[in-house]
Amino acid sequence: MTHALPGYLCPEDGTRADVRTAPWCCPLCSGPWDLDFTPDPASVLEPSAGPNSLWRYAAALPLPGAFSVSLAEGNTPMVPLAERVHAKLDFLMPTLSFKDRGAVMLAEVARRLAPRRVVADSSGNAGAAVAAYCARAGLNCEVFVPEGTSERKTDRIRAHGAAVRVVPGGREATAEAARAAADEPGVFYASHVFNPYFLHGTKTYVYEIWEAMSGRLPDALVVPVGNGTLLLGAALAVEELARRGVRPPALIAVQAEAVAPLASAFAAGAEDAGPVPQLPTLAEGIAIPAPPRARQILAAVRKSGGTFLTVPDERLREAQRDLARRGLSVEPTAAACWAAVGPLSPDDPLQGRTAVLPLCGAGPK
């Protein structure tokens, strides 16, 4: 029932909107939405008794009632990388990246709203995930990609029955084209950046760590950050679990040295991040020169007592090779956290703390 969906809330100006009728962004400031939702800390959370998917955390999710969209996503394993560091293998998700956590939520919301079509903009993992879950939900889907996107990537999206629209120009031109389409009647914008239901899907990453660690969390969560969807989801889960008496960890955010607007703003003590040049880097998945949720990301890291780290491409490539030698084949972006805190890092950024990091995207697909 769509009337049961929690509404949107703008974190900048307090604007509220009904999910059924709201535009894809705040009409006053054009910023991304948050969700007017806080799970009851007294609600019973028994993931082991739930389905083998992220819906096992239904008591903490903002979609009440029966759900129907799932590919048995979530519940990914954790393996040790070092004495005090574990990796969570989110590249084992159905579409081979952590983006499934948010995509299944967007597809379930869209299924309940019954739009004429769903649109998304992504040249990589998010596009494939949204296409797959829309296929599962029986929704018409169109994914906007920048010109020059490899045929390998567009073929993955088309394989799920989604239409692919190639947009002249770069990533920002692609986003603008998708947002123009999202303004049309009967269109649901499955944005992994602007739609907060995506963040409530990614927060299950931390709930699974809590479950695997028997009701605890590590001293630190190390997270790669571009648009910040995994980090902000993690911050949501940390706050929610803190209300249940779980000690919160520090959030350590990792960016590519070549494109690090958030790390620069954090070092300068700024509350927001200005845009930086879009320079080439192996870590394409986190090379976001102007993240729309920059203020929220910076605030979340500071609140946790965490910090930002950056990694150069040469260390990132060696970290990817090191993981492969350990049997873990991941894309370059997924190796960023290991490059930042593993044995290749020039110092000891963890300072003896326990930590979990995600391997969030598979290698050659």
Image (cartoon, rainbow, N blue to C red):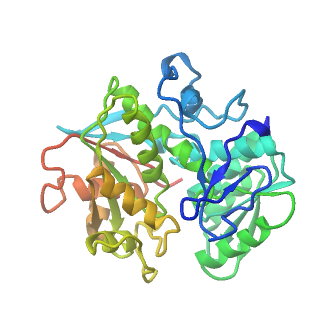
Residue 126 located left or right of residue 83: right
Residue 227 picture location, percent across and down: 49, 63
Residue 133 picture location, percent across and down: 69, 44
Residue 301 picture location, percent across and down: 34, 56
Q: Is residue 180 visible?
A: yes
The foreground one among 1 and 135 is 1
Q: Quadrant of residue 101?
A: top right
Residue 11 located left or right of residue 181: left
Q: Is residue 332 visible?
A: no
Q: Quadrant of residue 182?
A: bottom right
Q: Is residue 159 above or below residue 105?
A: below
Residue 40 picture location, percent across and down: 52, 29
Q: Quadrant where the N terminus lies?
A: top right
The foreground one among 322 and 65 is 65
Q: Quadrant of residue 4?
A: top right
Q: Given the current orientation, which residue lies at the most extreme front position?
A: 14
Q: Is residue 279 above or below residue 133?
A: below
